[in-house]
Amino acid sequence: MNEADQNPTAPRPASSRATDGDPAVVPAFAPPPPGRRRLRYAVVGTGHRAGMYVAALTGDHADVGELVAWCDTNPGRTDYYDAQVGEAFGLGGPAGLPRYGAQDVERMVDEQRVDVVVVTTPDHAHAGVVARALDAGADVVVEKPLTTTVEGCRTVVRAVARTGRDVVMTFNYRYAPRNSSLRDVVASGEIGRVTSVHFEWALDTVHGADYFRRWHRDKANSGGLLVHKSSHHFDLVNWWLHDVPARVYASGGLRFYGDANAAARGMGPRPERGTGATGDPWSLDLTHDPRLKALYLDAEHHDGYRRDQDVFAPGITIEDNMAVVVDYRGGATLTYSLNAHSPWEGYRVTVNGTEGRAELEVVERGAVILGDDGRAVLDPSATPEGVAAQGTRPEGERLLVQRHWEAAREWRIPQGIGGHGGGDAILLMDVFRRDLRLAPDPLGRAAGYRDGLRAVAVGIAANRSMVTGQPVLVDDLGLGDLDPAADGDSVELPVTPPGGLPAPDLAGPAVPTGAAR
């Protein structure tokens, strides 16, 4: 699998390295009919996350889609991907695809006859780009989260209502077999009607810290981790339960990272940035990763964006410890926690039902190990000392089901393909070939804009609750009809005022369009 499918600081466990998936989770597709036209794709936002789609359209899915244009504010990052495309097709140099700026989404769609726009910009820009692409006549594939604000949600809903065009949300965690297996358990009725869910996610001091180096550290850009990161997790619960969040209460704060916490722990002077710093386990040196060096260090002179900021510097406005309680319309309650400075990475989910209980435990990285140079080793399993250190917390996944009055039994988890627990490659099949599926997906993994709304509704409500100290009713946010039964229906919301949407600054507050996800 292409290594571009994950954040470079995220764990790459064995489940992400498999190349042969189980038919139970890998769909079957018909070959494209002879002579069928390939769909024309444009990428808006050429940061790290765009690499997954570029690799797909120059590799496994080049027979059904082609890249025809770039849209970004940073020519250095665009150069990087254009050269990749040229190399993939043996052109002997860059592909020379047409380039457009932040204000030119509509012109790009028109001039390049774009069928689908792939949106991988920073989160705050998603809604505006999605709406403009739909209005210009293209369908959209958008990275999570759908957007970061109530108004962003309304912008997307109104654009879908106006145009009737398609929006695909890329919730790749749905496709990880361990998560779809839990969906199987709940849907099978093995544990009866769900009464409560407990979901704990631990981000370690490599991956978790990375959100405090990047543009994500400013809540105006990302909505905080409860929107940017947790939208994955809230979507999973919504999907497992086939239900809608109704009321949200949250508590959290910046309790580990940031300058005030560093001072309180007596940490002393800190390096301004990770590149060039020595012996500091909190620093990320961009020269140690050729991809990050090319996309960010070599391109930062175009816009000043630094990918390797100090996690203990001033100006961080997102939380690193969060707890959320969500009541669902169907009667279940979710208790959720997210910690971004754990010594290991993974998650635990417990689903309680009227007839039993299911428990999913995943260890993606059992420990963060320091190398001889004092830096964190991104893949501890690659070193003998790393393997030894993980002996008491081995990497792996296990799903247990226990009905009342019975012993627990292990539920089989099929083998997936690629990153994010074996889900990325399967997701990409659905993104680029869903019309060629030989049978409907019994797991219902494909996600649309309403799934995106239901996921960010929890994070947006949680952010509001942390400010007010009060529970927030999701219906009071005014996001439209979130009931899953409405997914196939048209949406009725007030139309955008005459004149349409303004062309937003895709870069936002001091953040380039294609900053790394």
Image (cartoon, helix red, strand yellow):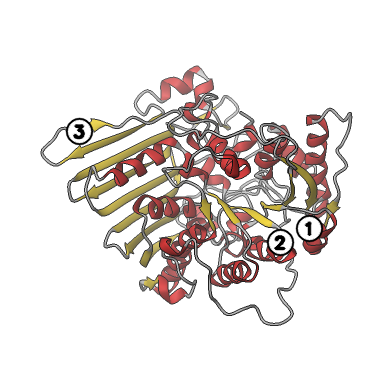
CA neighbours of label 2 inside 10 A, class few (<14), some (14 to 19), many (20+)? many
Kind of residue at disc 3: Ala
Q: Nearer the viewer, residue 285 or 356?
A: 356
User: Which residue of the protein is positioned furthest toward the bottom in this rendering?
Assistant: 498
450 shown above or below 58: below
Residue 121 % position (x, y): 68, 54
Which disc is residue 133 wearing? 2
Give me the residue at 65% from left, 39% from top: 52
Query: Circle 1 is placed at which residue position?
Result: 109
Kind of residue at disc 1: Val
Helix, strand or loop at disc 1?
Answer: helix
Q: Which mark lies nearer to you, 3 or 2?
A: 2
Of callouts 1 and 2, which one flags the residue occurring earlier in the amino acid sequence?
1
492 shown above or below 390: below
- Rounded to the nearest angstrom, the CA distance separating label 1 from label 2 is 7 Å
Residue 99 % position (x, y): 84, 51
